[in-house]
Image (cartoon, rainbow, N blue to C red):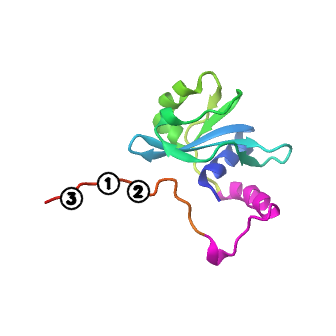
Amino acid sequence: MSTLAALAQGAARVHGARAVIAAIDARMGEVYWGAYRVAGDTGVMAPVLEEAVGAPEAVEWPGGTGWHGVGTGWEAHGERLEAMADGRLAANLGRALPDARDLLPLARAAWERGEAVDAAHALPVYLRDRVADKPRQR
């Protein structure tokens, strides 16, 4: 289950948001981000683009308006993210943390799509595999 998707689901539950750009501060001037919309009348957030990590200026904005920004990335890099929104941002909801109850509708939808895996085969997915390359000290 995606932390970014859980943030988006939380924005839907708490604020009634139907289109969300979730961003988590990734340090080093970057954000982990994902774009989500409520799928039909399910109330469940579905990804619109593949989740990614990069500079706030590299965040891809899907078409349409009414997007809501949520997460620690919006708190840390809100001005930079808002500058890239080009009028598509309805609200910057700011800092939010994932809530376990927001994973339940996402997990149920994944289960119904047949995406469940045995716990022994579950693996974490990292958007950034290498945090930093540091030169060796002599």
Q: Which span of residues is magenta-colored?
A: 100-122
Q: Which mark is residue 136?
A: 3
* Residue at horizontal 58 percent and vertical 68 percent from the top: 123
* Circles 2 and 3: CB atoms closer than 8 Å: no
Q: Which residue is mark 1?
A: 133
Q: Residue at x 75, y 38 (%)?
A: 16
Disc 3 crowd, CA 10 A, few/some/many (<14, 14-19, 20+): few
| Magenta span main SS | helix
Q: Does residue 34 appear to the left or right of 101 in the view shown?
A: left
What is the three-letter code of the residue carrying label 1?
Answer: Asp
Near-viewer residue (47 or 89)? 47
What's the mark number on residue 130? Answer: 2
| Residue 89 against residue 72 in the figure, above or below | above
Label 3 sits on what residue type?
A: Arg
Q: CA distance from mark 2 to mark 3?
A: 16 Å
Label 3 to label 1, Cα distance in Å?
9 Å
Mark 1 vs 2: CB contact within 8 A: yes
